[in-house]
Image (cartoon, grey):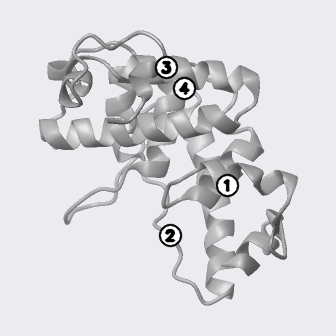
Amino acid sequence: ALRVLEARGMADGWSLQDRGLALAAIHNEADLLVVESLDSGLLEGLDPAMLSALVSCLSYRKRGPGEPSSVQLAGTFPERFEGICALATGVAAAEREEGLEPAEPPDPGFAHVIHAWASGKELVEVLDGTLTGGEFVRNVRLVADLMRQLAKVAPPHLVAVAEEAGRCLDRGVVALAIGRPGSVNGMDAMDGP
């Protein structure tokens, strides 16, 4: 794994390079891809709902059989998602070269749901019949947690958007599920249980 970090310019021996310092704050299966996406600028210049949609591609994994997820959002999403997929291909190639099993590729299957939720839609409007309420809450919490991690290492302009996205996500049934029925203000709403 160290050689993968070296190949991607994140480490030199056991020392993290400037580019790889964010890895220490990201705790996700796709941590390297998250940092690559952050470093590439693909997460910048977005509103909180679109940032939530893109970040969901780094944490969501479709369960069960069936066709792979497809992109269901318009605007800047398809182009940014393709950029993340290109980064994922490079990371996977570096992992294979070192004899490692590559991580799952980014999955856009939850992006339209979380985009709607972060935009203020109600639960009945965002559940599309393929997710249970529990799956919805679990996936929103994964994105909110990753958003909190990004807010620790992102440039200041992206920190503000990540914090706002967290506030948009942690409401309603999501806040109730972790025992904060009134939590919608401030970053304390994004803290874990």
Q: Which residue is mark 4?
A: 75
C-alpha gap between disc 4 and disc 2:
27 Å
Under mark 2, the amino acid is Ala
**Circle 2 or circle 1, nearest the eye:** 1
C-alpha gap between disc 2 and disc 1:
16 Å
Secondary structure category for the residue under label 3:
helix
Front in this rendered view, residue 90 or 59: 59
Going from N to C along the chain, the mark reached first, 1 or 4, is: 1
Q: In the rendered image, which quarter is residue 136 located in? A: top left
**Circle 1 or circle 4, nearest the eye:** 1
Secondary structure category for the residue under label 4:
loop
Q: In the rendered image, which quarter is residue 16 located in? A: bottom right
C-alpha gap between disc 1 and disc 4:
29 Å
Q: Mark on residue 103?
A: 2
Q: Mark on residue 23?
A: 1
User: Number of callouts in the render?
Assistant: 4
Q: Residue at x 38, y 43 (%)?
A: 142
C-alpha gap between disc 1 and disc 3:
21 Å
Q: Residues within 10 Å of mark 4 (few under 14, many from 20)?
A: few
Under mark 3, the amino acid is Met
